[in-house]
Image: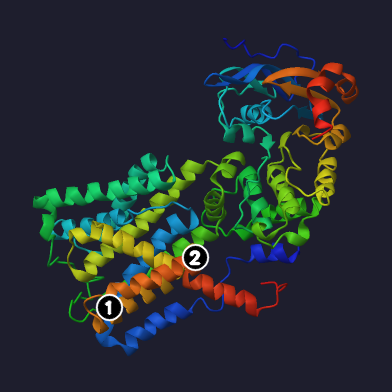
Amino acid sequence: MAARPAAPRDIVSVPLLETRALCRTFGAIAAARDIDFRLEAGARHALIGPNGAGKTTFVNLLAGAIAASSGAVLLKGRDVTRVAQAERVKLGLSRTFQINRLFRGLSVLENVYIPVAERVGAAPSMFRPAGRRRDVVDEAMQLLRTLRLADDAPRRVAELPYGRQRLVELAIALGRKPEVLLLDEPAAGVPSAESHIILDAIGDLPPHIAVLIIDHDMDLVFRFADRITVLVGGAVFATGSPREIGSNPDVRAVYLGQAAHG
Amino acid sequence: MRDEHPAARALAGRHRLRPWEPIPWVLALAWYVVFPKHLGFGTEVLVTILFAVSLDLALGYAGVVTLGHAAFFGAGAYTVGMLAKHGVWNEPITSLLLAGLVAAAVGLGSGLVLLRTRGLTLLMLTLCTMALLEETANLGHAYTGGFDGLDSLPIAPLLGVFEFNPLYPRTQYLYVLTVLFLCFVFVRTLVHSPFGQSLTGIRENTLRMHAVGAPVRARLVVCYTLSAAVAGIAGGIWAQANAYVNLGTLGLDRAATVLIILALGGHGRLYGAFIGAAAYMMLSHFLSKIYPTAWQLGLGLLLVAIALFAKNGILGIGAALWRRARPPRATS
């Protein structure tokens, strides 16, 4: 289907992130079907759905890691459907990954230095030592303090326990000071004994950031989300407050009922 | 408002000179005094170090896997050789700069195309680039001397004073040492800069670098071009020191040897090039004397051992021992 014109319709509240009839097909499979979605400033929005519902595809479409087949993605009212991932990052959209994508051989501090240096425009500088950019070093260190990672700052990421590696995953995304943050299963793979450090970190995120969190963990979702979208078969099945979603019999049938056992 | 956490201080001072860093330079000068009869061999080692440093920038820091780095060495060598042989230009320092520029142009041109790829494809394309250049040099007989190369290059005296004497290569040795030092300072500055830090980010996780908004390919092309320039200077100075060029400067042999040297010494550490080149060339020198028919067997066994047990080379072993010897919570 053809993309609809992508001008902001409603001046009163332009959402930070919006999709209109977003579609993505892989061969014969429609991984995203006509998704209309809005993420407001300061939102804590959860995206849930059974395995294979297209949650990660949707995040990849939002981030620009894969191209849309049709439809539009709008960031701060601007059509970014054809805009590359790196450019969307510069416009204030950061993401984390379901499976860690870290700079494993580098120290924790260096892992955060890299995104901060990119954001403040220090990264292209060739003839000044990295450490002379104390503004970058100090900001990276400050970010690690707020995530309670300061003690691990000199350690190589590969040496950290998995739960703390997940925090570094979050720290790298926050180094870009995003306005929109996409969290793809932030607690995935973290042993339950450590998962509270991730939950605390997400709970402490600056309130003005719009957060979209994808997760299976219903405790996490119902604890943080003020709005929930249920994705089934690549399409939006239901959207509403946690209470509405929790009491929606259709949602219970397709999803919550299964998840209660899984 | 400075963060005085030890980790922040360590990162802020990472570029500072370590106490051991003058050692290789002192040793190189000592060689000049102690072994005046082996300055030819010494010059060869220094040129190889320079070449390996250039490869370390691309491979060790940015993670660009290449098997064709001799393309740039050869481009530099032929620039110097052809300019001198055809009577166009033979002043050593300016021809060396030209060699670097020509190699950088080759690096930029090929890098724009082949750095779109990664892994095995990239490896094959670097090899192809080098093979194309080698065959071009082979076919362009009138200019390049073809298979025989160009010999007896009339290189002008350095600074108009110091003659290049192939039998007593004292000028060559000090000249190469100086150029190596300057290029090394350049590369060292580069890898400790925020740009260098972003290269290590690309090496460690290219996809994440895209996701933090870094212009990955542009950075790689810049790095590759600079690495090619340094390799071109290595090739150019090799041609000047030996007063000849041949197809071997563009060959797989040279490209593979420098890769082995970097693996042996340890990549991504700058000084791995020094240790690797010195160890490799000493070993091949002595092994070929002791066991002239099958001396490469010894090198091969050593390389297998390094690949199996010490992925970070000789310097990696050293660093591991050093960490074990020191208390774990020490700050540097």
Residue at horizontal 59 percent and vertical 43 percent from the top: B208
Rendered image quadrant of residue B264: bottom left
Q: Can residue B89 be seen in this view?
A: no
Q: Give the x, y percent position of residue A231.
A: 73, 22
Please name the amino acid that badge 1 sits on.
Phe
> Would you place residue B80 above or below residue B280 in this image?
above
Residue at horizontal 47 percent and vertical 42 percent from the top: B218
Please name the amino acid that badge 2 sits on.
Lys
Q: Residues within 10 Å of mark 1 (few under 14, many from 20)?
A: some
User: As drawn, which residue projects farthest toward the front?
Assistant: A261
Residue at horizontal 48 percent and vertical 46 percent from the top: B219
Determine the chain carrying the residue at label 2. Answer: B
Q: Can residue B19 be seen in this view?
A: yes
Q: Give the x, y percent position of residue B210.
A: 57, 40
Rendered image quadrant of residue B144: bottom left
Which of B12 and A197 lies nearest the eye of the viewer?
A: A197
For label 2, the residue is: B311
Q: Earlier in the sequence, mark 2 or mark 1?
A: 1
What secondary structure is marked by label 2?
loop
Q: Considering the image in quadrants, where does the N terminus of chain A appear?
A: top right
For label 1, the residue is: B41
Closest to the camera, between mark 2 and mark 1, is 2
Rendered image quadrant of residue B93: bottom left
Residue at horizontal 54 percent and vertical 54 percent from the top: B200
> Would you place residue B57 above or below residue A64 in this image?
below
